[in-house]
Amino acid sequence: MFHQVPLLLAQASADQDAGVKSVAQLSARLAYATMCATLAWGVLIATGWAHKITGTQGLRNTHMVLATLAIAFGSLHAFCFTMLKTIDFGLLKVLVPFVNGGQLRHALGIVGLELMIAIAFTVGLRKKALYRKWLRFHQMAYVAVTITIIHSWFGAIANGNLAILWLAGLTILIPTATIAIARFLPPEILMRLGMMEPEPGFEPEPTGGGNAMDVSVDNHRCHRYGVCQAEAPEVFQLIDDNRLTYERRPSPELYAKTRTAARSCPMRAIELRERVR
């Protein structure tokens, strides 16, 4: 009877690992889905497309909830590896890339998750740090999502789950990538695609003569999110006391950026008017 004890312990460890791996797989898939949703919804809010689709202005809380879920599921996925009995995957190996001969696909997941956590912790520093530096770091979320998606696909290949990720993962990834790419397209291309409506009275590429542009900001509606500064820093700037300053009559070469900033304002506080030179 005693000689069967090691076999029973090995079987128990294998059964535990099977359960842990199931939780790890489920949490990884939920993290993948919520991560893509977070990126897509963040772009929709930053560009103003979410307001156009839903007609609702206060949508940033949804973005924060999705980001929190993505980080929570990703952290659960990582923590599961420390509970494996038959595989040596300690906490140090989960936290530090390439430690003890770690693999590239694991390192990508570690870096992606840790970068997302760092970005989440700095969200509250937006008003305390220099905005442009904060924004540049916050935009590292694009990098974090990209390398984490690569980690997911490499993991699916290694574990024989490529068929599942190919069907479900690609279905989620394609619209996410499309929205993210559209985020950086020039306004003229977005107008041709029907994703952006031109301001009345303006041509997509205004010239130096004819009509010009006046800019005004409704201070009661403006919440100082700084999205306009990110899109057109030559026109809009948040100064040290969190007041917004802006060029009331931008030069023609800045019209496209100014339109993008007005379109991106989540509170729709920027108004553009046509004037005759």
Image (tube, grey):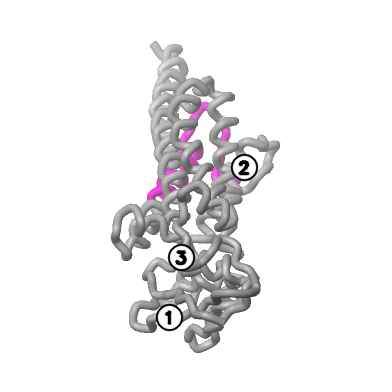
Q: Considering the numbered disc 2 on the image, is that residue within a helix, a strand or a loop? A: helix
| Spot occupied by residue 196 in the image (x, y as percentages of width and height) | 46, 55
Dot 3: what SS?
loop
Say which quadrant the N terminus sits in: top left
Residue at x 54% of width, y 23% of height: 159
Q: Residues within 10 Å of mark 3 (few under 14, many from 20)?
A: some
Q: CA distance from mark 1 to mark 2?
A: 43 Å
Residue located at (57% from left, 65% from top) = 256
Q: Amino acid at mark 2?
A: Leu
Q: Looking at the image, is 38 positioned above or below residue 212?
A: above
* First along the sequence among labels 1 and 3: 3
Can you give x and y, in whole percent of width and height, for residue 142 in the image?
57, 52
State the residue position of label 1.
Answer: 217
Q: Which residue is mark 3?
A: 199
Task: Give the residue number, with chain letter if any, for mark 2.
Answer: 108
Q: Nearer the viewer, residue 239 or 221?
A: 221
Q: Nearer the viewer, mark 1 or mark 2?
A: 1
User: Looking at the image, is 185 positioned above or below residue 177?
Assistant: below
Q: Which mark is residue 259?
A: none
Residue segment shown in magenta = 69-94
> Disc 3 marks which amino acid?
Glu
User: Which is more toward the observer, 1 or 34?
Assistant: 34
